[in-house]
């Protein structure tokens, strides 16, 4: 609010106006326009009824007519029978209505109108609520002798005959009502929790602003168009950034763990295959050799049976003493016998006898 804003007081609870405030008072029986929240001070004169407005906590002047009296700040509750008809958010400089007293960047302005009415600017220094009734019926009133007299319900459209006998048709009946102008900050609302979340740009944000229909006693209405994510373009909340970081870390850990598992499994399979091949080669019977270097049966029989896994690590060794004694003896005896048996006789030269 600016220094020129007229503050009527605060409005934090639901105000219930008197029943006669909802009666549209017309200047004549054949008029097509009436005003709510009226009184009859004298005779047939009509004036605004300040009792139809929420109580004021400040002594302010009463202009005539009451089409731009002032604002209630903090104001968080529309009167009974009223609804949020228009809003303007100061921080975004936008809304569906341009109030006479625009809200400051930290404020939200709300216009409360009777149900079925809408906000209107009938003049340069006036704001009010209006409704055009084209079907149904309307209850009108008239001032007679300084009192408000209710008339019978009038169907719309309707016809009438004036004093000159001329018949006229009324196709729409217009009605006007006070616009109750409220201003509040997010911290004025009940249940407000301050937010310390820091955006990606480094600026801290306050608690979220309420929607147009979030005021107590006010039906929900569409709020002004805003980014669906709740975060302005180019910014990212700390929670979103943390979620992305955690997700990326878990993904990297899963990939690395999978690679390590695959490598270890591959190495284990290779070791198992190599052990199996070595075991198969040791279980096969030893190949025989012919010739002078062949092992005798006695030397070969120093180990009997077959290899098993328990003997695979340290296989039994053939004793070299048996190989040397038996093998050498056989070779020596056989060679000596053959040389002795088949040596040719030595002949002496007779000429040299």
Image (cartoon, rainbow, N blue to C red):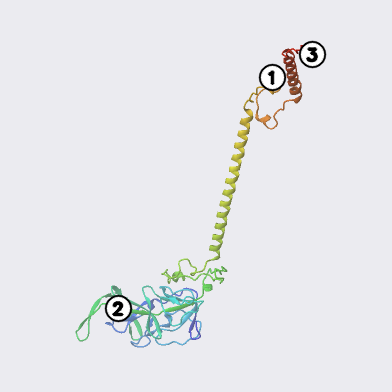
Residue at (52, 74) in percent of width and height: 188
Which label sits in the foreground, 1 or 3?
3
Residue 110 appears in the rendering: no
Q: Which residue is mark 3?
A: 352
Residue at (33, 79) in percent of width and height: 175
Q: Position of residue 336 (x, y in %)?
A: 75, 16
Outermost residue, right direction?
Answer: 353
Which label sits in the foreground, 1 or 2?
1
Q: Which residue is mark 1?
A: 297
Left or right of 187 on screen, residue 95: left
Q: Which mark is residue 65?
A: none
Secondary structure, mark 3, is helix
Identify which residue, 194 or 213, lies in the foreground. 194
Secondary structure, mark 2, is strand
Q: Which residue is mark 2?
A: 173
Graded by Cα atoms within 10 Å as few (under 14), some (14 to 19) or many (20 or more), the crowding at tag 1 reads few
């Amino acid at each position: 609010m600016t220094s020129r804003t007229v503050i009527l007081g605060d409005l934090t609870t639901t105000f219930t106006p008197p029943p006669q405030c909802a009666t549209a008072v017309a200047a004549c029986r054949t008029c097509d326009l009436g005003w709510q929240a009226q009184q009859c001070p004298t005779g047939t004169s009509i004036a605004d009824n300040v009792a139809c407005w929420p109580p004021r906590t400040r002594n302010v002047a009463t202009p005539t007519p009451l089409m731009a009296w002032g604002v209630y700040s903090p104001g968080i509750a529309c009167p009974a029978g009223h609804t949020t008809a228009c809003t303007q958010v100061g921080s975004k400089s936008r809304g569906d209505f341009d109030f006479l007293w625009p809200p400051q960047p930290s404020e939200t302005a709300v216009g409360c109108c009777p149900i079925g009415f809408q906000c209107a600017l009938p003049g340069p220094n006036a704001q009010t609520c209006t409704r055009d009734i084209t079907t149904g019926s309307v209850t009108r009133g008239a001032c007679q002798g300084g009192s408000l007299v209710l008339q019978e319900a009038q169907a719309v459209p309707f016809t009438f005959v004036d004093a000159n006998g001329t018949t006229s048709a009324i196709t729409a009946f217009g009605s006007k009502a006070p616009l109750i102008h409220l201003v509040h900050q997010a911290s004025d609302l009940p249940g407000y929790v301050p937010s310390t979340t820091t955006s990606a740009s480094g600026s801290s944000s306050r608690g979220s602003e309420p929607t147009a229909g979030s005021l107590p006693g006010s039906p929900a209405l569409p709020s002004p168009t805003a980014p669906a994510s709740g975060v302005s373009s180019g910014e990212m909340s700390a929670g979103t950034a943390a979620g992305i970081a955690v997700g990326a870390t878990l993904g990297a850990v899963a990939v690395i763990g999978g690679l390590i598992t695959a490598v270890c499994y591959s190495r284990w399979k290779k070791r198992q295959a190599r052990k199996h091949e070595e075991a198969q080669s040791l279980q096969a019977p030893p190949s025989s050799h012919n010739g002078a270097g062949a092992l005798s049966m006695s030397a070969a029989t120093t180990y009997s049976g077959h290899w098993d896994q328990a003997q695979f690590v340290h296989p039994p060794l053939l004793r070299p003493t048996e190989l040397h004694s038996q093998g050498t003896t056989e070779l020596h005896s056989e060679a000596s016998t053959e040389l002795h048996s088949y040596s040719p006789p030595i002949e002496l030269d007779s000429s040299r006898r």
